[in-house]
Image (spheres, helix red, strand yellow):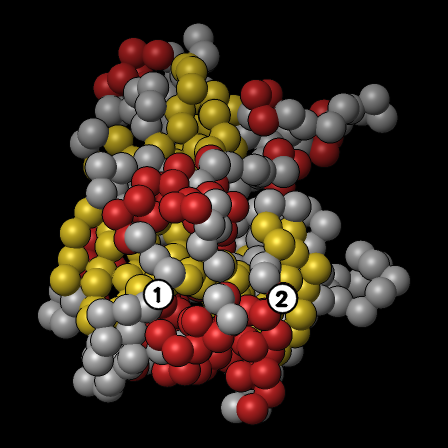
Amino acid sequence: MLPLRELLTTFADCFGPPGGEGPVAHLLRQHLQSFCHLHRDGLGSVLADKTGTQARPRLLLAAHLDEIGFMVQGITAQGYLRLQALGSWEASLLPGQRLLIQTANGFREGVVAALPVHFRTENSKPLKMEELLVDIGAASPPEVQALGVGLGDLAVPHAGLGILNEHYLVHKAWDDRVGVAAMVAVLQHFRDRPHPNTLVAAGTVQEEVGSRGAAAAVELAKPDLAIVLEGPPADDLPGLSPDPPQGALGRGVQIRLYDPSLIVPQKLWRWVVDLAQQRQIPHQLAVRRSGATDARVIHVAHGGIPTIVLGAPVRYAHSPASIIHVADVEALVALTVAIIEALDDARLHELFVS
């Protein structure tokens, strides 16, 4: 059992854009195979079942394996690569960034071409993704081919762990490796402890391109209730809003009540907030005006599944370098554990039937 910081680092280090989540899935299986029943669905999501003292309720923990990334879309006559975004990127963040490209023959590095300031004019327009070029040190398509790079190859930022002021961790892919690491930590907590339900943990694929993995995985999981573990964007940047932030680093687990794709049942979120207060778990409530998670497809499956989203806020999400606070992840794990310990069949009936 790895400490939480090591789990976070190990999962964030993994290469895993949409359609290329294999390394993350392999790592997840390694951590769970000794005490969970593992299987995969047809899209590649990993499902881990752990039966407690009762077969029901079935409680789904979902965290997506994929990170935003790229696919090689084209090769120019000069040997540069063109990119197809996998997930939502701000193109202006990318010039000068190093990429790690997965080819059939292993990994290659590339650099997103950056126009030096010397060549910029007052009329320079904002960058578009389709205008970006990647330099891999080739001068022609045959040289690109000789390096083993071709259409359909996948890429992510070439990054590593950074530590700021001890408790702030910098890396790519906190959305959603923070959720995956938290899910593993929760399951490890219950490795030798009883729980009054059956846990089904799903490491889902292709969330960043439309929650495709979750839509398939929930058909196999058939849960009575679901918790989506996420790395939501932090909103604590200066000047972002005149109102207090709802996702600030260092202030605890974020409990999402609403986003445009999900209205969390009031009985569910009020019960979860009560648990957090009873156990003195730092938490913050969020009513989001934008965004969505795997909850958008999970909560409407099988006639409707009560679903809540818990997260550790990520500052500079969907960028090559994002930041989390370790205490927020600890609070995310603690609240998820509290829910699992308290959710038996009688509680489920009280929340959603009576």
Element under label 1?
Answer: strand
Most distant residue in the left direction:
34
Q: Disc 2 to disc 1, how far (Cα)? A: 18 Å
Relative height, residue 53 to residue 261 (above, below): below
Mark in the foreground, 2 or 1: 2
At 42% across and 60% down in the image, what residue appears? 226
Question: Is residue 243 at least partly visible in the picture?
Answer: yes
Q: Quadrant of residue 284?
A: bottom right
Q: Amino acid at mark 2?
A: Gln
Q: Quadrant of residue 50?
A: bottom left
Q: State which tag comes first along the sequence, 2 or 1.
A: 1
Report the side of 25 relative to 303 (left or right).
Answer: left
Q: Which residue is mark 1?
A: 59
Most distant residue in the right direction:
242
Q: Which residue is mark 2?
A: 266
At 28% across and 53% down in the image, what residue appears? 221
Of 270 and 30, nearer the camera is 270
Residue 25 pos. (x, y %): 25, 52
Relative height, residue 147 to residue 295 (above, below): above
Report the side of 3 relative to 73 (left or right).
Answer: left
Q: Amino acid at mark 1?
A: Leu
Element under label 2?
Answer: helix
Question: Is residue 15 at least partly visible in the picture?
Answer: no
Q: Which quadrant does the N terminus fall into?
A: bottom left
